[in-house]
Image: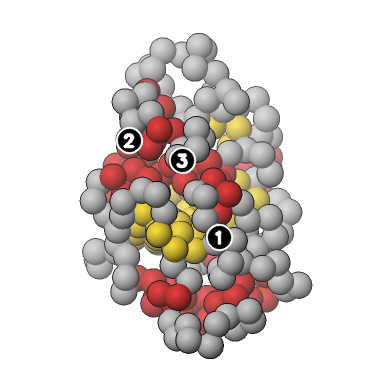
Amino acid sequence: MIKKELVVAKEPRSPISETFRALRTNLQFMNSTTEDKQTILVTSTSPSEGKSWVSANVAITFAQAGKKTCLVDVDMRKGRLYTMLNASPTPGVSNYLTGVNVDKDVKDITGFIQETEMPMLYLIPAGNIPPNPSELLISSKMTQLINELKEHVDVIVFDGTPCNLVTDAAIVSRLVDQTIIISAYNETKMEDLKETKKKIENAGGKVTGIVLNKVPTTSKKYGDTYYYGKKR
């Protein structure tokens, strides 16, 4: 059963679903790469700003548009995408990067890709919690993961860690086409947002947008402004 928080799949005609489709369109226009592939990192300043919720729903909109899309959970500390998509928590990113707890018959990235309940949408969960997530992400195996995955899907959406806690998301940002930062209405501090943007850019990443989440739907009529999310 598709969970309620996957609003784009559950309520495709809702105003919030339309807003996610607008975000998808903006991301497509912002893609400056020449190849017909797209890699997007979703991060935030702090926990509980709605990063994983946005990641999942954006990925679903790409899948609904006919793009073979893979969600990759690179939050190897508290990854939760597998719970949202009713999938297995392993094998995942950490298992691919370390080779630990991987069946001997698994030879490449296809052994880590899981199908979901939605057509064209796939998932690679975070996997077992490793002792050294940052070191794993900076390794050549992470670049290999991305390159292998590009051979099988059109769009890759990475759900990263919050930037003000650890460096994981900043490391991934330099490996993808674009990064979007999730902020929360009346919660995210401007100085934290600026610091997150600075960390990503200092790491060599490209911030292409900031998403304002948890905006009360009663505060603005739909269409008066862009908002991504709802008061939860």
Determine whether, in the image, residue 53 is placed left or right of residue 150: right
Could you say where residue 230 lies in the image, as x and y percent from the top left? Answer: 52, 25
Q: Amino acid at mark 2?
A: Ala
The earlier-in-sequence mark between 3 and 2 is 3
Can you identify the residue that label 3 sits on?
Answer: 1
Decide which of tag 1 and tag 2 comes sooner along the chain: 2
Instruction: Say which of 94 and 175 sits in front.
Output: 94
Horizontal side of residue 28 vs 210, given as left or right: left
The spot of residue 204 in percent (x, y) is: 52, 65
Report the Cα–Cα distance between label 1 and label 2: 30 Å
Crowd rating for badge 1 (residues with CA inside 10 Å; few <14, some 14–19, many 20+): some
* Secondary element at image label 3: loop
**Residue 88: assigned label:** 1
- Reply above or below: 128 against 62: below
Residue 112 position, x and y percent, is 48, 71
Mark number, residue 74:
none
Splitting the image into 4 quarters, where does residue 225 fall? top left
Q: Earlier in the sequence, mark 1 or mark 3?
A: 3
**Residue at image coords 54%, 32%:** 213
- For badge 1, the amino acid type reads Ser
The residue lying toward the viewer, choosing from 54 and 2, is 2
* Place of residue 143 in the rendered image (x, y in percent of width and height, measured from the top left): 48, 77
Q: Label 2: which residue? A: 22
Residue at left offset 70%, top offset 67%: 129
Disc 1 vs disc 3: Cβ atoms closer than 8 Å? no
Q: Callout 3, which amino acid?
A: Met
Q: Label 2 near label 1: C-beta < 8 Å? A: no
Q: Residue at x 60, y 25 (%)?
A: 232
Q: CA distance from mark 3 to mark 2?
A: 26 Å
* The residue positioned farthest toward the front in the image shown: 1
Determine the secondary structure under disc 2: helix
